[in-house]
Image: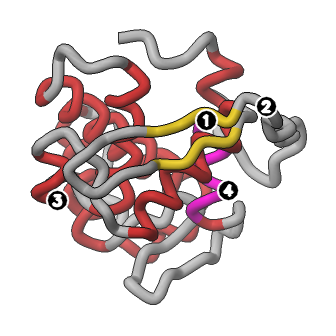
Amino acid sequence: KNYFAGQADYRNFILAMMRQESGFNPLAESPKGARGVMQVIRPTWNNTVGNLVEKGAITERWDFDSAFDVARSMTVGLEYFAEVLKLNEERFPRESPEKILMLALASYNAGPQQPIILHGRIPSIQETREYVASIWNAWKGEEISIIGPSEAFAFTKKTAAPKKQLDYSNPPTSLKEL
């Protein structure tokens, strides 16, 4: 599925994620122990680094202390996001790209095994709903809110007064691929 309208659109999406995750702070550490600009927790870090080594994308295992390195945090975070995006594509092949992308964001934030995500719905966890909406709002430059109880997936576009697109022209950090 085509989720992004070119490289710049993808770059803005990733930058919106980084802004939401860490405020671009490479030394960010959450109360739950997530680290770096992409705020990856230790078990996810270890699994994803193992996958990267297995695929030959990196030559050695990176320890969790290196999550504070911007390039490594982005590499691991983007790989993990790609994994949860693919997982949601496989689970819900008939869903729209927008819904799959939102489910992937919810999976990145709350974990892909959340029971409600397994049924194609965004959890009613307020933090997760705000996380998805905040990234979507920053990326698309339009304000959305995720509505309804956990048994319903819905979002509304407030088209009357769209938010101004955030300026990511000079982010503090980025990989050359972005």
> In the rendered structure, which disc, 1 or 3, sits on the residue that comes first in sequence?
1
Q: Position of residue 168 (x, y in %)?
A: 82, 40
Mark 2 neighbour class, 10 Å CA radius: few under 14, some 14 to 19, many 20 or more: few
Q: Position of residue 173 (x, y in %)?
A: 74, 50
What residue do we see at 27% from left, 33% from top?
56
Mark 1 neighbour class, 10 Å CA radius: few under 14, some 14 to 19, many 20 or more: some
User: Which label number is shown at residue 114?
Assistant: 3
Find out whether residue 104 is within the magenta segment.
no
In the image, the segment drawn in magenta is 12-21
Cα–Cα gap, marks 1 and 4: 10 Å
In the image, residue 87 sits, relative to residue 111, either above or below, namely above
> In the rendered structure, which disc, 2 or 3, sits on the residue that comes first in sequence?
3
Q: Quadrant of the N terminus?
A: top left
Q: Secondary structure at mark 4?
A: helix
* Amino acid type at image mark 1: Phe
- Quickly name the residue at label 1: 13
* Amino acid type at image mark 2: Ala
- Quickly name the residue at label 2: 160
- Mark 1 or 3, closer to the camera: 3
What residue do we see at 27% from left, 41% from top?
84
Q: Is residue 12 visible?
A: no
112 with respect to 105 (left or right): left
The front one of 157 and 138 is 157
Q: Secondary structure at mark 2?
A: loop
- Mark 4 or 2, closer to the camera: 2
User: Which label number is shown at residue 19?
Assistant: 4
> In the rendered structure, which disc, 4 or 3, sits on the residue that comes first in sequence?
4
The front one of 4 and 70 is 4
* Amino acid type at image mark 4: Arg
